[in-house]
Image: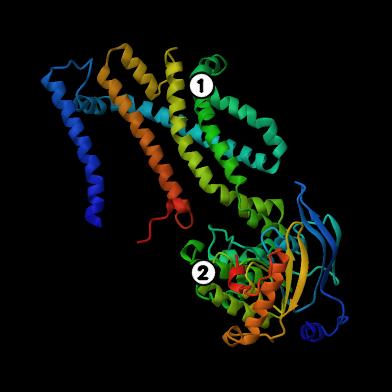
Amino acid sequence: MNGQKALEYAFPAIALALGLAAWEAAVRYFNVPSFILPAPSLIFFTLIKDWGTLSSSLYVTLTITLEALGLAVVGGVALAILFAQYRIVERAFFPFAVVMQVTPIVAIAPLLLIYLSANEAVLVCAFLVAFFPILANTTLGLSSADHNLIDLFQLCRASRWQQLVLLRLPSALPYFLGGLRIGGGLALIGAIVAEIAAGSAGQGAGLAYRIVESGFRLNIPRMFAALLLISATGIAIYLVLTALSHLLLRHWHDSARGREA
Amino acid sequence: MSLVDAIVPAKVAPLAAPAAPLVSLSGVDKVFANGVAALKGVDLEIREGEFVSLLGPSGCGKSTILRLLSGLCNPTRGNIGWRGEAPQIGFVFQEPTLTPWSTVFGNVWLPLRLKGVSKAAAKPQVEEALERVGLSGFANAYPRELSGGMKMRVSIARALVTRPAVLLMDEPFAALDEITRTKLNDDLVALKCGLGATVVFVTHSVYESVYLSTRIVVMAARPGRAVAEIAVEAPLPRNEEFRLSPAYAEKCRETSLALCAAMDMPPPASCNPGKVRS
């Protein structure tokens, strides 16, 4: 069992290592200049060498992403609860939520940059893309509580508040967490897209701005290093949210349950 | 019928007027919003301490009667009259319908919690209910760790925890295997005798209805209506002896024939009870 588990982790690690080795070898063998394709080792050294600049950019992007995600959670859940309590509100506002979702964020970003400061615009963009999956999933979850349980609550003369807290919110939790995982990834993408839009106007200091800047300066290794950090951030967000989901659902939800041998 | 009618109300509720049923439905019609007539002209009286089974094919409005009795919906026409105030009701659904995010304790506590009883204050009652269904020691288990039969026991404990005077059960054992169902039937008979509650039990099963009931109401579909009543005189509690007795077999035959008639099936000479079950 343990050996098998180790193998499960070993195979993707070996594949990754082989890929990187092939990349390194190809760059060295064909003498590819670093402004076209830097070797993995050079990217790694650049990451260390420029860590001062890159880490502060990472901090900026990460802060904006998490702030946007936090706002999206608060806003999405609050609106979903409002929707679930008053269907008329859902009727009135859901179309606007859909419009926000289907309009490409990259098309809205320049407009937002006119009205808001660069940092605010980036925050709003990241919020807008993270908001919808959380709202839509939580709304679905709140309305998919077991009908018999709703009957039971009615039989016990439960108040609306009791029904919300003891039945609808727990029923919605797995749906919300699914939306959160999508929203977490999208918040980062929204932040990066908005930073690139803002960066071309010479603003901002996030990772995407570093990419644009490095592109202008033909500093391709640093471009890759920034890209690497963005990927790592996305993976970290995903892993943290997956762990959170597992932690909250492990006792009862099928998604978090291991197969009983 | 005579035995149960005459003795039980007088014994269980000596202060009440002996003839007054606990609840009576008179001329009840139920038409759903989509125009389907679920019930038409149902007259039904349920006396205190009875175990009444509603037996009939799908769509005959058995479950609708339970929903009407519980107050989850109102009749389109006709009247539902309780003797005095509507009593505390326990409802057991076809599925266990437990909240998967709470433990067994949390699930059984729920009806009390909704009435504002704290966890500590509810503990003795929850433990008593769990003991009654044979699940002491499982308070901290989560529903997914339990078998189908145990989940149904939790569901019954949840219905019992408020000490209801009336227990409404909507095909609670339909999804269980035969062996588990037989065991739960035995336990339900014992439970009913221990509590002295009135039970209205919806079922598809002729055997189950005969084994459990003091009275069986046979229903027909389209529109849903009561077409026959069969009294099962054998005294409660019952056990395996009753299940193997000729009286039981004869009652099953009688009930099956009534069900055949309710379903407009020709009652053949060999109307085998085993063929009627759905």
Amino acid type for the residue under numbered disc 1: Pro
The x, y position of residue A199, in whole percent, is 42, 16
Residue B161 in view in this figure: no
Which residue position holds label 1? A104
The x, y position of residue B264, in whole percent, is 71, 63
Q: Nearer the viewer, mark 1 or mark 2?
A: 2
Given the image, what chain letter belongs to the residue carrying mark 2?
B
- Quarter where residue A89 is shown: top right
Report the side of B63 relative to A177 (left or right): right
For the N terminus of chain A, the image quarter is: bottom left
- Give me the residue at 57% from left, 71% from top: B153
The x, y position of residue B113, in whole percent, is 65, 63
Q: Residue furthest front?
A: B269
Check chain identity for marks 1 and 2: say if they share one: no
Say which element carries label 2: loop
Report the side of B80 relative to A185 (left or right): right
> Does A111 sit above or below residue B144?
above
For the C terminus of chain A, the image quarter is: bottom left
The x, y position of residue B71, in whole percent, is 77, 60
Which residue position holds label 2? B177
Amino acid type for the residue under numbered disc 2: Asp
Q: Residues within 10 Å of mark 1 (few under 14, many from 20)?
A: few
Report the side of B247 relative to A249 (left or right): right
> Does A168 sit above or below residue B107?
above
> Does A147 sit above or below residue B133?
above
Quick one: A95 or B37, which is closer to the camera? B37
Numbered disc total: 2
**Marks 1 and 2, how far apart at CA:** 54 Å
